[in-house]
Amino acid sequence: MKIVLRELQATKRGYYQLLAFLVAIILLFGATVLYIEHHGHIVTSMNNQIVWGLPDVFAVFLLLSAAGALSIALLTSFFGKAEYRPVAPLSGLLAIAMLLAGVLMLMFDLGRPDRANLAMMNFNFKSVLAWNLFLYSGFAGFTAFYLWTLMARGMQRFTLLAITLAFVWRIGLTTGTGSIYGFQVARQAFDSALVAPMFIALSLSYGLAVFVLVLMQACRSNDCQIGDAMMTRLARLQAIFIGVGLYFVLVYHLTNRYFTRHHAFEDFILFNGGVYPLLFWLGAVLLGGIVPLLLLLHPKIGQMRQRIVAATSLVIVGAFAQLYVTIIGAQAFPLVLFPGRQVTSTFYDGVINPYTPSLLEWLLGFGGLAIAGLIVMIGLKLLGFLPNRLDDAAIELSLAKPVAVTT
């Protein structure tokens, strides 16, 4: 038997119920966008101090996960790990879906999406956001090109070129996303060259966690049993990525602790900042890092599907906690306008900026996730992104023969 790629065969009521649920969330998302556009950002909890709120946390999660989801395709086509070949197309689909959803969230959160064409026609190349327009579009284009070379007859000779371009753009995309914050010299927490490599490391873990959950659910719906060998490989890879992410977070905070000017911020974010230390230690470090590592390092992890689901789900929970602390906690800490000088006034000087996400911001965030989910579900239903077999014998077969593609 050959391994072939096929469309999602699910005809059960659950598929269409999930599809209807995602559409309903997207409709709420659209209504929220129109409401905020009409009334302005004053109806949200964002203000002059917290200008990047919860929607930006969701958007950055989607952008980082998009880059990280492509890791499976990179392992297959760039690093020669043939055992991942049957699931490489799904990796590319997830990357494009989450990238589009993240970019849409950023565009709608700006307040006037109807004027987005002005930003596209008038570039300020001193702004990292202007660079990202090219990084986002280039990443989506090269990933689509890669999928074309995988799934079209006679195009396989261009696969290495396509994945190389996507690899370079994947690094550039995550670096650009991290540099949006790392180049903000006015914010003590953001003013660090380590933000970009930290985002690259975190994207590996976030993207793979999403990929594993989607793969398991899609295969369950498609009557495709995933063998213990594949699950063991994915679990071990997830554990490595979690460790790499924790290492860069550790280095980032140790570097900040080394410089005296960052001591006050580090004390705020790690110890006395209210909700932010709680989210960091309990959410990002414990639930998003240590607990998944302990779950995934079991010697028979490939046979423990519920443990893998729990670990990858916790990684995603930890991702939102980490990004919330990184993006919003940095803005909550008061600005230091004149280092080494005491400044007093009646306008927020030395004041911790309060922020509680509003319902509208939650709707924007979940709407972005729903858009990504809808793209993936439609893509799986219409095109051949899923292998018909992923059992242990099929993985051995993929090491010897190329994956066939359905037409």
Image: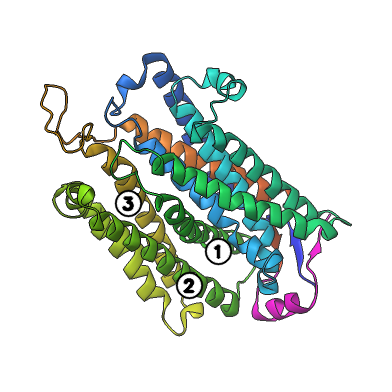
How far apart are labels 3 and 1 at the CA level?
24 Å
Kind of residue indicated by mark 3: Ala
Q: Is residue 174 above or below residue 295?
A: above
Kind of residue indicated by mark 2: Arg
Q: Residue at x 64, y 62 (%)?
A: 74
Residue 397 in magenta stretch: yes
How far apart are labels 2 and 3 at the CA level?
25 Å
Disc nearer the start of the sequence (3/1) = 1
Q: Which residue is mark 2?
A: 305
| Residue 352 position within the rendered picture, expressed as x and y whole percent measured from the top left | 16, 36
- Quarter of the image where the C terminus is located: bottom right
Q: Residue at x 73, y 77 (%)?
A: 399
Mark 1 Cα-neighbour bin, 10 Å: few <14, some 14–19, many ≥20: some
| Residue 50 position within the rendered picture, expressed as x and y whole percent measured from the top left | 29, 32
Mark 3 Cα-neighbour bin, 10 Å: few <14, some 14–19, many ≥20: many
- The answer to whether residue 91 shows anywhere in this view is yes
Which mark is in front, 2 or 3? 3
Dot 1 and dot 2 residues touching (CB under 8 Å): yes
Q: Relative to residue 278, is residue 251 drawn left or right?
A: right
Q: Relative to residue 132, is residue 296 drawn left or right?
A: left
